[in-house]
Amino acid sequence: MVSQFVSSVPVRLLGDLDFEFPEGTHAIGRLDSDSEGLLILTTNKEVTQLLFCGGKPHTRTYLVRVKGRMTANTLKRLQTGVPIRISGDDYYIAKPAHVEIVERPATLPDRPGELPIDAPQTWLLITLTEGKYHQVRKMVGALKHRCQRLIRVSIENLALEGLQPGEVRELNEHVFFQQLNILYPTKN
């Protein structure tokens, strides 16, 4: 599924979900077609500005499966900032990130075409405070580990918490702003 409501090519879209979205609903912090996990949908046009363009950086946490066994040295490089290509020959040093090696969650469903569970792999939990284009994939790729699965599990305190693929959870707007750690806009 593509994290948008319209497309010029025939793909599965958010509007195909079994949910009546209000007019003006849009995605914040889109996921690419090879990623999965938490996607914020809102009708409030201020949320993107408040969340990603404000003075305080907001966290995004990803569960990531990479090919091969990651060493402690490689893990340290991810934690302290790694150069990633942003375009052509231009590189950017990714900000330090919280990265830890974790076990594959027992409740995580297999993905079609996924490599066998006993193939050499490492599961990581990566928390970023920035969101460059394909940043997680570029970070692990720069260290010679191919990203095989990428699941956004949270943005600030707003988390998947058992949501299944395609499931939608509505939140009260005050709760929504509180979980995202952004100030609820007051009308003058």
Image: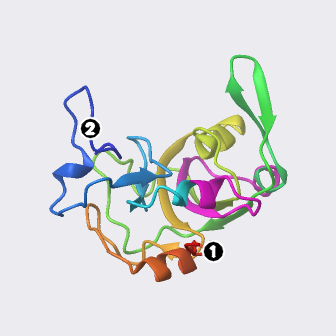
Residue 145 shows up from this direction: no
- Counting other residues with Cα less than 10 Å from the Cα at mark 1, is it few (<14), some (14-19), or many (20 or more)? few
Q: Kindly identify which residue carries mark 1.
A: 183
Q: Give the answer, above or below, for where 163 lies relative to 47.
A: below
- Counting other residues with Cα less than 10 Å from the Cα at mark 2, is it few (<14), some (14-19), or many (20 or more)? few
Q: Which residues are magenta?
A: 49-77
Q: Kindly identify which residue carries mark 2.
A: 6
Q: Residue at x 65, y 43 (%)?
A: 140
Q: Residue at x 41, y 52 (%)?
A: 27
Give the Cα distance between marks 1 and 2.
30 Å
Quarter of the picture holding the C terminus: bottom right
18 with respect to 29 (left or right) = left
Of marks 1 and 2, which one's residue comes earlier in the chain?
A: 2
50 with respect to 106 (left or right) = right
Q: Position of residue 107 (x, y in %)?
A: 37, 74
SS label for mark 2: loop
Dot in front, 1 or 2: 1
Q: Residue at x 28, y 68 (%)?
A: 168
Q: Position of residue 60 (x, y in %)?
A: 60, 61
* Residue 45 on the magenta segment: no
